Image (tube, coloured by chain):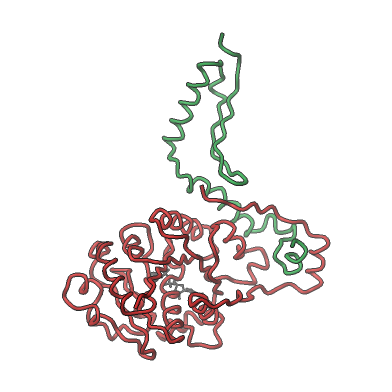
Chain colours: A green, B red
């Protein structure tokens, strides 16, 4: 299919990257991830705080370094948490 | 008669809902179907002037729902097509003058009299929008290939799904093929990729839309208009015909294409899914 798509002009040459159309599409993809899931900032903050609380029960973490985001995935959009760990609680 | 109610909506204003309603209504009626077009943009009546029927209005939609006249009395017959009728919006009232329940009743009545009922929705996501989709069997989303219009369209698609209606289909309006070819405007593939709904048709940006609107004669009458032809194709698709998409791409010359074929990289286009 790739061959025919390119022959028909359906697949973009690499120069497409960086064009206004490409920028528009990328910006839309980012903004729509947030629009679609529609998690208000308060809810994001609440989830983050509860996650940190649960994990802190078992391991000592570095609260300043916690990253918690909504990102675009292949099939579904993803909530990703990055939580720096200092040591396990004993 | 068990007709279908098709609501034409967008979220953003000025993307071509009224133009689309007038042209599709006219084109479907030209194919011999009985069509009613209903202007649900209460307070900002426009469909009447686009169709050139503004001088014939006696009653409007609010008169109907408030019982001052029968629906039949408010329906204005088109100048040329006896199968086509317009139910105008009220100009001096606001959107809250009609409730979704009243709208649904009205649509049910119109469905019993017409093959197709096309509802021209106001912009926005509030009461006017809820009224416009209250009686809908199908929804058509109109957007232009611009970031803000596509974003609003995505919002509307989510709302339509939340109402339990099946996925709307898309009309991409005001495409400028030379801008798409230069990479200055998103293509239909880009917009479909993002919105993840079926494409019902693409309509080029066309000055004939402006001249025909000035005259009050929808562009589908103008056989030389690309947009008119595009709307006619969409009407045939609505009627169940298989009509291939219009070829709007002003394709680069063969040598350029062959160059791309052997030298060009591919873009990373992962399909978006709604969550
Ligand atoms: N395909 C097109 N080419 C050129 N002008 C267009 C096209 N579609 C719509 N327009 C113009 O854009 C403006 C807004 O269209 P309209 O149908 O009133 O939008 P809406 O009902 O969504 O607010 C009008 O001036 C109309 O003539
Ligand atoms: Mg309008």
Give the answer, above or below, for where A86 lies relative to B24: above
Q: x and y percent of residue A73 in the render?
A: 60, 44
Give the residue furthest to the top.
A90
Q: Which corner quadrant holds the N terminus of chain B?
A: bottom left
Q: Tell me which residue sits at (67%, 68%) in the image.
A: B181
Instruction: State the residue at coordinates (63%, 59%).
Output: A20
Q: Nearer the viewer, residue A17 or B66?
A: B66
Q: Is residue B172 left or right of residue B128?
A: right
Residue lying at the far bottom in this picture: please name it.
B80
Q: Quadrant of residue B201?
A: bottom right
Q: Residue furthest left?
A: B68
Residue at image position (37%, 86%) is B83
On the picture, is B118 further left or further right than B266? left
Please state the horizontal and vertical placement of residue B44, each as a whole percent of the image.
Answer: 32, 70
Does residue B192 appear left or right of residue B104 in this picture?
Answer: right
Residue B196 position (above or below residue A43): below
- Total marks shown come to 0
Q: Quadrant of ligand 2?
A: bottom left
Residue B119 falls in image quadrant: bottom left
Q: Residue furthest front?
A: B1
> Hey, which quadrant is residue B92 in on the image?
bottom left
Residue drawn at the location 46% of the way across and 26% of the way down: A49
Q: Which percent across, then down, holds residue B142?
A: 47, 67
Residue A85 image point, x, y percent: 60, 19
């Amino acid at each position: 299919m790739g061959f025919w798509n390119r022959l028909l002009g359906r697949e973009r040459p690499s120069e497409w990257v960086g064009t206004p159309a490409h920028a528009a599409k990328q910006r839309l993809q980012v903004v729509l991830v947030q629009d679609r899931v529609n998690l208000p900032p308060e809810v994001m903050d609440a989830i983050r705080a509860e996650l940190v609380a649960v994990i802190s029960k078992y391991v000592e973490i570095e609260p300043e370094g916690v990253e918690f985001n909504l990102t675009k995935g292949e099939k579904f959009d993803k909530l990703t948490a990055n939580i720096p760990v200092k040591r396990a609680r004993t | 008669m068990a007709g279908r109610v098709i609501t034409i909506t967008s979220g953003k204003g000025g993307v071509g809902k009224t133009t689309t309603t007038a042209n599709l209504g006219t084109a479907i009626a030209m194919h011999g179907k009985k069509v009613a077009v209903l202007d649900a943009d209460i307070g900002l009546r426009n469909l009447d002037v686009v169709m050139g029927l503004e001088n014939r209005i006696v009653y409007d939609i609010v008169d109907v729902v408030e019982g001052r006249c029968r629906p039949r009395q408010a329906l204005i017959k088109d100048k040329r097509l006896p199968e086509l009728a317009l139910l105008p919006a009220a100009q001096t009232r606001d959107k809250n003058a009609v409730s979704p329940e009243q709208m649904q009743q009205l649509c049910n009545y119109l469905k019993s009299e017409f093959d197709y009922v096309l509802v021209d929705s106001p912009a926005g996501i509030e009461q006017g929008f809820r009224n416009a989709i209250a009686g809908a069997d199908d929804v058509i989303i109109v957007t232009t290939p611009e970031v803000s219009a596509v974003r609003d369209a995505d919002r509307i698609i989510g709302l339509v799904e939340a109402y339990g209606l099946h996925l709307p289909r898309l009309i991409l309006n005001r495409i400028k093929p030379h801008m798409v070819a230069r990479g200055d405007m998103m293509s239909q593939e880009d917009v479909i990729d993002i919105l993840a709904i079926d494409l019902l048709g693409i309509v080029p940006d066309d000055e004939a839309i402006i001249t025909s609107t000035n005259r009050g004669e929808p562009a589908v009458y103008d056989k030389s208009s690309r947009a008119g032809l595009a709307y006619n194709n969409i009407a045939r698709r609505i009627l169940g015909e298989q009509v291939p998409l219009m070829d709007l791409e002003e394709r680069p010359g063969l040598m350029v294409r062959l160059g791309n074929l052997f030298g060009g990289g591919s873009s990373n286009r992962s399909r978006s899914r709604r969550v």
